[in-house]
């Protein structure tokens, strides 16, 4: 079977490392990765615990298909209580680290407690040790990864680490692996920082076996072929997610200048075409595409910055290639901050990876700060003399660096938009749900997306549901609740397999995932059973949040999206119909009007022992 | 005859007359439907495109109607998601 | 006809499907650590280079093997390991200037590319055509 059947447990307080058997009943009920890690988290910690305290539990989890030949099998996720939100965090990453963690023989690493000095965790198959990291503390992600490979004389070592942002508890610090892939959202990197854990370095040589190799390889071969011929796959390969910019702009769903507009007139300067076109200096931003482990799509962008650009003209250390712009980064630094300078966007993207920060939340927080500045609520004496105006590309690069290094006004930006705006008495300017900033889709133009944002268990997020189809067919609140619910459950299941969500965008459908799982795991899930797994996962995440103190009041959107009509585009004049969609959504879920799963619903999912108040 | 501007994104740009771009001006007969434009550009006629005509989303069942007028702006986008 | 792997790093995305295909073909397991082809990456992923045995005409690995465990397959041109004759002395791993033979501590023998007997799994699976299996005669400038 393709679960390794082992969990590595590391207590940072005592330094004790143990290996235990995976609970196989839970594996069949929660599949792996996101689902299984959420189950362990709920069992092992008090949801009311301080996310940055020793009682928070940090789980790195792979799925049963991680490390197999199923396309995109490099995924792992980090599940913990998120410091940006106070809600359950599940941040998913690609690259190569996840596969090596699995090859070392573990489905999961569960980290508890807090070390009294900086350490890193070294995993080489059965040899696992906590090593002193005093000399690594204060180094960037890129330095840490390079030094660990050198120190252990193993270029095959895969590293997931935090940069200065995580060390300094920036609330949206991420965990970066393989230089530019990240468990990006909700501040999981700050949890590592709070525990004094600088990095996990893993190398595995045990491999992964599947239960029925012939059956598994048949479906691998068929699914590779399906994806190879699929138009969206070809587009991801050639252009990544970057073309969303043009589409969202024309649609009028592109959040611009902190949601002041839904269209941005500078899109032509930062879109996929701009990235692929030579500029006046003869420089082209895009270099090549890049795959995560096992991925036959390769949507990743490798890019470089024009050496003559102001941001790096005297900084030769950035004259190299690294991870380039994808849609969300381009949106969060570009339209959202009103900036149309592709080199500044790319440089800020490099800084996010180097220092370990989530570009969506950083961009959202900077945009909120720009609005505070333009409205005169803060001034240049607050912002270290920087004119924090929409469109100022220098402000973007300066503040990205200050936040990464935790200097000056960067310390304020590191709080996230909600805490920052509340600090200045203007919470309404923060565009967020449960403290987490929005992805690049305006809830007034994409109604189902708004419902997804409001009900996502980790705060505003575009990756936990998929209502793009219904949202583009019809821009009212009707008929959105059910597709939102169904896709949330499906996504929860897919996130638990070890594969990337983009497989579903590139032609693969439910029967393929089910066949891959069944052939790999030696357990036969029916379509209904697997659907229930997804719903069960969604529901325990919800229960974690309810136990943590969240209520239906938190399933909401900022007033601006509910009351100020979209100024342009196909949704001109519309506001979010959340208040109409939400009651229908609760009802379809089998939840009370207060958003609490009813006893019958919990029983149907095999969760009868869960209550909001008790264990 | 009428002139319209077609805007597109992603790989669909390869279907525009210039070979690969994000917009083009087309000259069409009066009364041309959106489906006929898709056909003319050799884009497969499928349900899942996002079609935007003059800032309005055009549902699938409207696409065979003669909606195009002089100066129209027609956005044709492939199914995209994610980020 | 002599054949070998022709590798074009410009097409490689670094996905490592080839490594999993190789270990699966030979050991029935997905395990890059046991793959005979390895992908190396440079400059933050700007370049990914799959490295595999080039099946040298003058194969030093074969020449130094004290037990005659390495022999050339006359049909494919691959230098192949006869596992029963390999005593795990590792001399071939020292002789190979490219480091494409490695010792396998799990079975006490060496792992060496055998072109899968004429239908290499890595070339079959490669999604971008970066690894192709071709006649050596048509590719004088094999990379």
Image (spheres, rainbow, N blue to C red):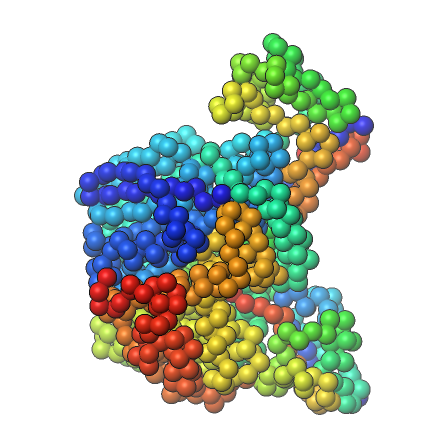
Q: Residue at x 68, y 78 (%)?
A: B6
Task: Place residue B76 in its image quadrant.
Answer: bottom right
Give the vertical position of A432 relative to A153 (above or below).
below
Side (left or right) of A218 relative to A126: right
Give the vertical position of A456 relative to A193 (above or below).
below
Residue A334 x, y percent position in the rendering: 46, 68
Side (left or right) of C48 relative to A173: right
Residue A428 x, y percent position in the rendering: 30, 79
Q: Residue at x 29, y 58 (%)?
A: A42
Task: Place residue A349 in its image quadrant.
Answer: bottom left
Residue A328 x, y percent position in the rendering: 47, 65
Task: Place residue C142 in its image quadrant.
Answer: top right
Side (left or right) of A502 relative to B18: left
Residue A39 in sight: yes
Q: Residue at x 26, y 36 (%)?
A: A132
Residue A433 in sight: no
Q: How many marks?
A: 0
* Of residues C6 and C21, the one drawn nearer to the viewer in this rendering: C21
The image quadrant where one finds the C terminus of chain A is bottom left
């Amino acid at each position: 079977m393709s679960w390794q059947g082992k969990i590595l447990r590391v207590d940072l307080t005592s330094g004790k490392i143990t290996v235990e058997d995976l609970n196989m009943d839970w594996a069949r009920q929660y599949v792996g990765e996101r689902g299984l890690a959420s189950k362990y988290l709920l069992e092992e910690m008090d949801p009311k615990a301080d996310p940055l305290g020793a009682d928070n539990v940090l789980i790195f989890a792979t799925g049963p298909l991680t490390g197999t030949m199923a396309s995109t099998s490099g995924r792992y996720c980090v599940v913990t209580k998120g410091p940006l939100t106070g809600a359950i965090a599940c941040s998913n990453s690609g690259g190569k680290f996840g596969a090596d963690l699995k090859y070392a023989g573990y489905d999961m690493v569960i980290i508890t407690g807090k070390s009294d000095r900086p350490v890193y965790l070294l995993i080489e198959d059965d040899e696992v040790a906590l090593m002193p990291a005093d000399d690594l503390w204060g180094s960037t992600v890129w330095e840490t990864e390079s030094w660990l490979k050198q120190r252990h004389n193993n270029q095959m070592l895969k590293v997931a680490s935090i940069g200065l942002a995580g060390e300094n508890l920036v609330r949206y610090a991420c965990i970066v692996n393989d230089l530019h892939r990240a468990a990006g959202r909700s501040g999981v990197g700050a949890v590592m920082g709070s525990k004094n854990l600088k990095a996990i370095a893993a190398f595995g040589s045990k491999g992964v076996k599947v239960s029925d190799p012939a059956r598994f390889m048949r479906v691998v071969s068929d699914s590779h072929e399906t994806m190879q011929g699929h138009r969206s796959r070809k587009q991801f390969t050639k252009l990544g997610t970057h073309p969303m910019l043009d589409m969202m702009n024309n649609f009028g769903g592109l959040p611009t200048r902190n949601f002041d507009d839904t269209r941005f007139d500078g899109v032509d300067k930062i879109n996929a075409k701009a990235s692929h076109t030579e500029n006046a200096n003869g420089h082209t931003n895009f270099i090549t595409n890049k795959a995560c482990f096992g991925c036959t799509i390769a949507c990743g962008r490798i890019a470089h910055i024009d050496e003559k650009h102001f941001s790096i003209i005297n900084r030769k250390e950035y004259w190299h290639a690294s991870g380039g712009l994808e849609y969300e980064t381009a949106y969060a630094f570009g339209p959202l901050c009103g900036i149309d300078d592709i080199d500044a966007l790319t440089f800020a993207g490099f800084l996010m990876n180097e220092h370990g920060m989530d570009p969506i939340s950083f961009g959202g927080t900077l945009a909120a700060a720009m609005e505070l500045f333009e409205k005169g609520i803060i001034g240049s004496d607050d912002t270290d003399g920087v004119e924090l105006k929409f469109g100022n590309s220098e402000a973007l690069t300066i503040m990205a660096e200050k936040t990464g290094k935790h200097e000056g006004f960067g310390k304020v930006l590191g709080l996230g938009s909600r805490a920052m705006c509340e600090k200045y008495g203007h919470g309404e300017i923060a565009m967020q749900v449960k403290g987490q900033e929005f992805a690049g889709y305006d809830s007034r133009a994409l109604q189902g997306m708004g419902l997804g944002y409001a009900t996502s268990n980790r705060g505003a997020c575009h990756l936990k549901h998929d209502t793009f189809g219904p949202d583009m067919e019809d821009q009212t609140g009707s008929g959105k609740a059910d597709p939102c619910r169904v896709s949330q459950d499906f996504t929860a299941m897919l996130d638990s397999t070890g594969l990337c969500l983009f497989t579903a965008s590139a032609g693969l459908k439910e029967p393929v995932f089910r066949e891959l799982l069944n052939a790999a795991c030696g357990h036969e899930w029916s379509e209904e059973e697997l659907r229930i797994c997804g719903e069960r996962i969604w529901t325990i995440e919800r229960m974690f949040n309810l136990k943590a103190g969240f209520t239906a009041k938190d399933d909401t959107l900022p007033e601006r999206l509910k009351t100020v009509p979209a100024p342009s585009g196909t949704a001109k004049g519309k506001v979010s119909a959340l208040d109409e969609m939400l009651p229908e959504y609760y009802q379809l879920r089998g939840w009370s009007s207060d958003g609490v799963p009813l006893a019958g619903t919990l029983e149907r999912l095999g969760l009868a022992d869960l209550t909001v108040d008790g264990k | 005859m009428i002139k319209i501007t077609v805007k597109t994104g992603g790989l669909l740009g390869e279907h525009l007359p210039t070979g690969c771009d994000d917009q083009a001006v087309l000259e069409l007969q009066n009364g041309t439907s959106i489906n006929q434009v898709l056909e003319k550009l050799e884009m497969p006629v499928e349900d899942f495109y996002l079609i935007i005509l003059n800032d309005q989303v055009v549902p699938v069942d409207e696409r065979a109607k003669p909606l195009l007028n002089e100066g129209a702006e027609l956005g044709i986008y492939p199914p995209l998601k994610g980020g | 006809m002599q054949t070998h792997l022709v590798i074009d790093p410009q097409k490689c995305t670094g996905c490592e499907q080839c490594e999993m295909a190789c270990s699966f073909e030979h050991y029935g397991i997905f395990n890059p650590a046991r793959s005979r082809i390895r992908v190396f990456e440079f400059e933050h992923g700007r370049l990914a280079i799959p490295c595999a045995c080039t099946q040298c005409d003058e194969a030093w690995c074969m020449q130094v093997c004290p037990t005659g465990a390495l022999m050339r397959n006359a049909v494919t041109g691959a230098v192949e390991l006869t596992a029963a004759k390999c005593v795990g002395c590792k001399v071939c791993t020292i002789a190979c200037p490219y480091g494409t033979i490695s010792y396998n501590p799990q079975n006490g023998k060496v792992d060496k590319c055998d072109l899968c007997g004429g239908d290499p799994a890595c070339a079959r699976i490669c999604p971008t055509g970066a690894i192709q299996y071709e006649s050596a005669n048509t590719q004088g400038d094999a990379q």
